[in-house]
Amino acid sequence: MNKSSIVLVVLLALVAGFIGSLYLNSSKPVKLESALWFGEQSRALPAFVLVDHNRQNLDNNRLLGKWSLLFFGYTNCPDICPLSMQTLSAMVEAIEQPELRDRLQIYFVSVDPERDQPEQLASYMAYFNPAFIGASAAAEQLDVLTRSLGIAYQIHKTAEDERSYGVDHSSAIILTNPAAEYAGLFSAPHDASVMARDMTIILERY
Amino acid sequence: MPAPGRSLLLLILWILPMGANAEIVISGAWIKNLPPTIPMRAGYLDISNQGAQSERLVSLHSPSFEKVEIHRSFEQDGLSKMEMLPALSIPAAGRIRLQPGARHLMLIDPLQDISIGDQIELCLEFEKAGTKCINMEVRK
């Protein structure tokens, strides 16, 4: 490689880096590999209170100071929800730097509050990942959070099926920032290593 | 009956039972373990139809669960959904795979404690091949 082409490569790299930094600092949502990150358009959440698996309140203040991923599901969901729990565990492990991992908390929000009492959520978290926090609340409170995040759910409980009914729910995983604002989302399908790469970019930068 | 007609009839009578004798092979059967507080488990397996006719899995039964159903998890309009399937068709010389995040067995209300390493009997009733019983291993 001659001198002028080396200069050209260096210049191109500088330009690419500059464009890249503009992109990440932009006020528009940023599309990463699988995340849509709202950047400066992150927005405050209305006041909500859920109850976590230790019977402590999970409210806006609890989300302050860390990045959080909230995923929605229910424990009587033997196929998909264990997959999501495992994907998120693998995602956390795939974030290489422990100091970045420490700045992230995972929440499992049950959209089936009737069956998912705190004890049920506690045994589910203990089984899949004791570092995760499970939480839910009666519909009125739960809906304050789900509506503000665009999370939909529908409980298919009927008179004939009062115990093993299914619950449809949004598959998006929601990101909140250390200011407890709605900061982005990961749409399905969820891949642990892809999510880890995106989370690493976000955590390293902010 | 003239001779050619009779031999055709004999030929048909000889071929018919061969079709009815569809060969069903079940492999890779396992159950996903969950905390004991959850009254259902998902089960997965492969069904291979080595016969020359299509087959249908019409019902399932296990002595360790109150009931066993066929379910399908799927994604629609950003929603994660599940539906029950009344039966499963397996094409001639075909294979279907029940796997996490897709079609699976739903084992409802355990009649005993279920732990990792257990072998759970499952009987599958096919339209032509009749009932086949296998063991499913409970895994982490």
Image: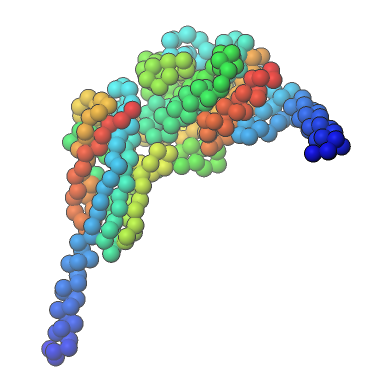
Q: Nearer the viewer, residue A73 or A143?
A: A73
Query: Which residue shows up at 20% across the image and 56% down it?
Result: B129
**In front of the other: A188 or A95:** A95
- Picture quarter containing residue A70? top right
Give residue B76's position: percent from left, percent from top.
52, 42
Q: Is residue A163 left or right of residue A99?
A: left
Q: Residue B124 versus residue B77: which sits nearer the camera?
A: B124
User: How is the protein colored in the picture?
Assistant: rainbow
- Quarter location, residue B72: top left
Residue B91 higher or lower than B31, as above or below: below
Question: Residue A186: horizontal and vertical position, in percent?
Answer: 59, 31
Quadrant for residue A34, please give it: top right
Residue at (56% x, 21% y) in the render:
A96
The structure residue drawn at horizontal position 47% and vertical position 17%, both measured from the top left corner, is A132
Residue A54 percent coordinates (x, y): 43, 10
Residue A200 percent across, percent down from the top left: 62, 23
